[in-house]
Image: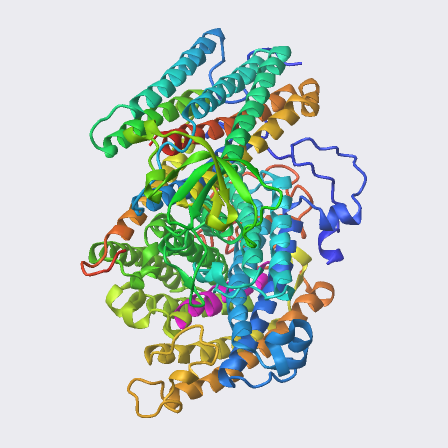
């Protein structure tokens, strides 16, 4: 006996099995990201100070446009298959994959920017903050030799580094600063360990990016070697494209919330 | 090979005009994004209002993606029920946890 | 196991509805190791989980020894511990760290690698598709993947015992900041193992729900489903929606450990007297909320399949319909729904305010109502029945009072004022073990004895089954009943010396120390636990011996049951049913008036 409703829908639910399955999986993903969003809300509400303006808004907006575009190309790819237009499907999903690539590319650039951005606690109690230009050859933090050069600025209090959207921040002059190792009390980059904001930022966007990559791999497979099924079982192939598309839309949905929450608020 | 209008997903037959529908949604999403960014720079007075505005716009965009790109609006009860319960449980996780962490006896020391 | 599954050559199942009907017989690997057939996967889950249960039991025995004889070398196994684990078991005695790691792993292994895979995945996989008249699960390859994730997770957990620093030691609840501060990679292994186990559960949950919704045979309406299927359906939803927040929390705890974030590490955290080099700003309470958001539905995952099994066996062995089928179904749905709203009753002592504590207390009290309704329906179902006291029925009957005790002793824990005294004491341990050990595990034993003939064509030995039941029943109670007294006297959980530091013998003249009478119970419990272990030996021998030598059944339906899994050949072939069965009536049509036999199977056509 064959497994029924793998391709044609069951009359009372109106679904074929895989579509039921993917929606159930998406429900669990809502709870997964929901857990992380809850963590974000709790950590932020419980914090005395919360950073603003640490992320590049134009880049984030561009990434949002990129994902929304990939969403419509995904649904149009499926519509093309329903209309028996295989080459259109190939075209639309090629754009989807390109968008995925662009998204991950921009994200990598943003991550690199954070990893090369340092905050240094100075021996005199002040703080230096900026992007790393270079370290001297003999730079060793433990042995206190050498020096480090940043493109940034100095502040008296660490809290001044938090809100980069405040009016005074407009007047910040960034220049090349060289700091000898002897003057450095503590040095760390804006990676996940920097504070809870970067922690939740990297975790949320990192998990999201993994989903982008995973979704792109599946869509890439269906675009490439998997598309052979169009010749042998077009209905089933169309369903596969629909189901993977649903996952992709969900990935876009998460970003729709991630972007304002992390970049704008 | 199959004919063009297959009913294999339980939807009404897809036809040319729904492509226009998708495009309308697409531009609405782009506009919504621009709106979100613009609204985030408007000083409403309290940060809570900015948050509410941003989440409202995000909610509308999410509804458009889920409803039209994911065809939720034409699915039957089964999926609605699953996603409805999910939304309820997510909301209770967030709000009950938030409430629990902010309701403590008056003499508790907080840093 | 070769006999039981391969009477008929298994066909290669690519699970997509396309069968190559003249396929050659699959090789050993495809048939038994990398199978996508739900029956093989069910048995794989069953055997693996039974092994984990035994291993978890062994860990507990060592812990009970330590509690009764703190610091003394463990007899028989002490040298083995020292040989394999080194310094932590010096001289063959368990150090406190080793005790803690055994405690954490006992809980983790029993819950996540033992009971849930057995109750949900093993029985569910084997029985549910048969009961609903389906050829297999909706996604056979996903099914195989879920089993493989489970095995991988189990391997990671077991390997963690042997790494430097040892296995996880922060309890099965892995609270931060302790979990992050302990200097062992065992905690990291624990998180990775949990991630794999959670993935396995999620894949299974999707499969079960999709299967039950989509693959019910014609005529199998929702209200004609056997209660076991309803129980598995709700259980799957609990796993689907409650596990992911724990996965999120596990990711964050992993980040705390390897990426030096401070999700759960508060500002000003000091470890070993020194300020920790972390950013701070995190919240230990956040971990607890996310953990218990799963933790509470998890306990319903532990009990619901068991209730389902007991219901099937009671109906079958009373030869009458279950009393209150609709009440059972609606109560199960309500229990499932409410289970998401009660979690903070595990956190009453975290400094919560009155309003929120009252909220969770209220929801906890509310959830006890449907639980009691379920137990009541099962109890009333016995009234007026023609009870057959075979081994499955003995275990099913034993479940009822044991779950009653476990459930009722949960009430003072759900009420915040009494929980203040009882939290983190042995009372809690007694409560939850009563529900899971003589509760769920008895139901699982019942299920094994019950469905064994369908899987193998032979019955397990009845005499040794009764020995297994009576010995287990007596010794379970001797092990766990005293723990209520210990808990009420104030004996706390997770004390490597069994409370000796707080005993009247150690600190005479101080009020509220643990009296000798309470401390002496440790010895009783230890002996009862060892006897309980011995009582499982006849079961293990019976299980494997009966596969080849048990009494052969002379029918496909030896228990004269109404449900569909008994209306197939024995064992069911690949694809289960030659043609889709058609269902004409409800699941418990026993002793139907004006009918010749005393039962009418669900798929028997109307005359």
Task: Note whether residue A186 is visible.
Answer: no
Q: Residue at x 39, y 29 (%)?
A: A173
Q: Residue at x 49, y 30 (%)?
A: A251
In this picture, which residue range is highlighted in magenta? C430-451
Would you place residue B47 above or below residue C296 in this image?
A: above
Q: Nearer the viewer, residue C469 or A24?
A: A24
Q: Is residue C443 magenta?
A: yes
Q: Nearer the viewer, residue C464 or C94?
A: C94
Residue A215, percent across and down?
Answer: 57, 30
Q: Quadrant of residue B108?
A: bottom left
Task: Note whether residue B65 is visible.
Answer: yes
Would you place residue C524 above or below residue C480 in this image?
A: below
Residue B32, percent across and down?
Answer: 36, 19
Q: Nearer the viewer, residue C452 or C250?
A: C250
Residue A46, percent across and down?
Answer: 30, 47
Q: Quadrant of residue C511?
A: bottom left
Residue A176, percent across and down?
Answer: 48, 32
Judge left or right: residue B97 versus residue C114.
left
Would you place residue A240 above or below residue C42 in this image?
A: above
Judge left or right: residue C352 versus residue A17.
left
Q: Could you tell me what secondary structure mostly forms the magenta stretch?
A: helix
Q: What is the total number of numbered labels drawn onto the structure image? A: 0
Q: Residue at x 30, y 66 (%)?
A: C411
Looking at the image, what colour scheme do you see?
Answer: rainbow
Dividing the image into 4 quarters, which one contains the N terminus of chain B? top right
């Amino acid at each position: 006996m064959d497994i029924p409703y793998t391709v044609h829908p069951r009359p009372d639910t109106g679904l074929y099995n895989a579509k039921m399955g993917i929606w159930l999986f998406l429900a669990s993903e809502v709870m997964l990201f929901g857990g992380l969003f809850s963590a974000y809300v709790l950590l932020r509400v419980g914090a005395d100070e919360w950073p603003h303006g640490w992320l590049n808004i134009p880049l984030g907006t561009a990434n949002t446009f990129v994902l929304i575009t990939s969403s419509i190309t995904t649904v149009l790819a499926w519509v093309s298959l329903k209309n028996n237009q295989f080459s259109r499907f190939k075209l639309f999903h090629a754009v989807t994959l390109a968008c995925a690539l662009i998204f991950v590319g921009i994200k990598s650039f943003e991550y690199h920017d954070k990893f090369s951005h340092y905050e240094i606690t100075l021996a005199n109690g002040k703080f230096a903050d900026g992007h790393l230009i270079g370290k001297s050859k003999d730079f060793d933090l433990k042995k206190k030799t050498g020096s480090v050069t940043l493109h940034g600025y100095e502040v008296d209090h660490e809290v001044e580094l938090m809100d980069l959207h405040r009016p005074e921040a407009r007047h910040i002059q960034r220049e090349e600063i060289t700091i000898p190792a002897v003057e450095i009390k503590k040095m760390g980059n804006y990676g996940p360990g920097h504070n809870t904001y970067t922690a939740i930022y990297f975790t949320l966007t990192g998990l999201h990016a993994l989903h982008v990559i995973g979704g792109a791999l599946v869509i890439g497979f269906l675009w490439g070697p998997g598309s052979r099924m169009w010749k042998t079982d077009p209905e089933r192939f169309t369903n596969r494209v629909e189901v993977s598309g649903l996952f992709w839309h969900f990935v876009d949905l998460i970003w729709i919330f991630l972007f304002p929450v992390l970049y704008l608020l | 090979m199959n004919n063009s209008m297959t009913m294999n997903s339980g939807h009404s037959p897809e036809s040319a005009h729904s492509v226009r529908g998708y495009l309308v949604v697409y531009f609405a999403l782009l506009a919504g994004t621009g709106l979100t960014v613009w609204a985030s720079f408007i000083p409403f007075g309290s940060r809570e209002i900015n948050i509410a505005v941003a989440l409202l716009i995000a909610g509308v965009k999410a509804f458009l993606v889920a409803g039209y790109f994911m065809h939720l609006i034409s699915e039957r009860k089964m999926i609605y029920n699953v996603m409805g319960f999910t939304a309820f449980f997510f909301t209770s996780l967030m709000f009950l946890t938030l409430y629990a962490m902010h309701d403590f006896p008056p003499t508790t020391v907080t840093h | 196991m070769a006999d039981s599954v391969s009477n008929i050559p298994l066909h290669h199942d690519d699970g997509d509805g396309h069968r190559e009907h003249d396929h050659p017989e699959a090789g050993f690997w495809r048939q038994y190791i990398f199978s996508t057939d739900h029956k093989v996967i069910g048995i794989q889950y069953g055997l693996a989980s039974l092994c984990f249960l035994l291993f978890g039991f062994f860990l507990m025995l060592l812990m009970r020894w330590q509690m009764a004889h703190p610091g003394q070398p463990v007899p028989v196994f002490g040298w083995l511990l020292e040989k394999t684990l080194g310094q932590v078991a010096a001289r063959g005695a368990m150090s406190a760290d080793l005790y803690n790691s055994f405690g954490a792993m006992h809980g983790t292994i029993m819950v996540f690698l033992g009971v849930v895979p057995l109750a949900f995945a093993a029985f569910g996989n084997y029985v549910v598709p048969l009961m609903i008249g389906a050829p297999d699960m909706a996604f056979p390859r996903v099914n195989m993947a879920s089993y493989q994730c489970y095995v991988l997770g189990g391997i990671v957990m077991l390997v963690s015992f042997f790494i430097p620093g040892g296995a996880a030691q922060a309890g099965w609840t892995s609270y931060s900041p302790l979990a992050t501060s302990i200097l062992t990679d065992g905690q990291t292994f624990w998180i990775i193992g949990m991630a794999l186990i959670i993935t396995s559960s999620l894949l299974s949950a999707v499969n079960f729900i999709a299967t039950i919704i989509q693959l019910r045979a014609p005529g199998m309406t929702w209200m004609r489903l056997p209660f076991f299927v309803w129980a598995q359906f709700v259980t799957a939803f609990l796993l689907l929606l409650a596990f992911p927040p724990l996965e999120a929390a596990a990711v964050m705890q992993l980040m705390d450990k390897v990426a030096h974030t401070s999700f759960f590490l508060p500002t000003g955290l000091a470890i070993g007297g020194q300020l920790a080099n972390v950013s701070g700003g995190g919240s230990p309470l956040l971990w607890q909320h996310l953990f218990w958001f799963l933790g509470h539905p998890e306990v319903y995952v532990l009990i619901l399949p068991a209730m389902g099994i007991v219901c099937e066996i009671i109906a079958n062995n009373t030869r009458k319909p279950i009393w209150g089928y609709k009440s059972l179904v609606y109560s199960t749905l309500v229990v499932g729904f409410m289970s998401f709203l009660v979690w903070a009753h595990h956190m009453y002592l975290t400094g919560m305010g009155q309003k929120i504590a009252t909220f969770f207390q209220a929801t906890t009290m509310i959830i006890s109502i449907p639980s009691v309704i379920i137990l009541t329906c099962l109890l009333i179902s016995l009234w007026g029945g023609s009870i057959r006291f075979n081994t499955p029925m003995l275990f099913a009957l034993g479940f009822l009072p044991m779950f009653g005790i476990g459930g009722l002793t949960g009430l003072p824990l759900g009420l915040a004022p009494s929980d203040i005294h009882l939290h983190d004491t042995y009372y809690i341990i007694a409560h939850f073990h009563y529900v899971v050990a003589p509760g769920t595990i008895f139901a699982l034993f019942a299920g094994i004895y019950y469905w064994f003939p369908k899987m193998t064509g032979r019955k397990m030995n009845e005499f040794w089954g009764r020995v297994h039941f009576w010995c287990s029943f007596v010794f379970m109670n001797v092990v766990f009943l005293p723990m209520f007294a210990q808990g009420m006297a104030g004996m706390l959980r997770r004390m490597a010396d069994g409370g000796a530091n707080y005993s009247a013998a150690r600190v005479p003249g101080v009020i509220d120390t643990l009296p000798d009478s309470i401390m002496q119970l440790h010895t009783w419990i230890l002996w009862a636990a060892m006897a309980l272990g011995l009582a499982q030996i006849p079961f293990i021998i019976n299980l494997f011996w009966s596969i080849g030598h048990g009494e052969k059944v002379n029918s496909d339906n030896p228990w004269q049951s109404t449900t569909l899994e008994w209306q197939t050949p024995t064992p069911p072939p690949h694809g289960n049913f030659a043609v889709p069965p058609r269902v004409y009536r409800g699941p418990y049509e026993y002793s139907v008036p004006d009918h010749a036999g005393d039962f009418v199977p669900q798929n028997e056509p109307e005359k």
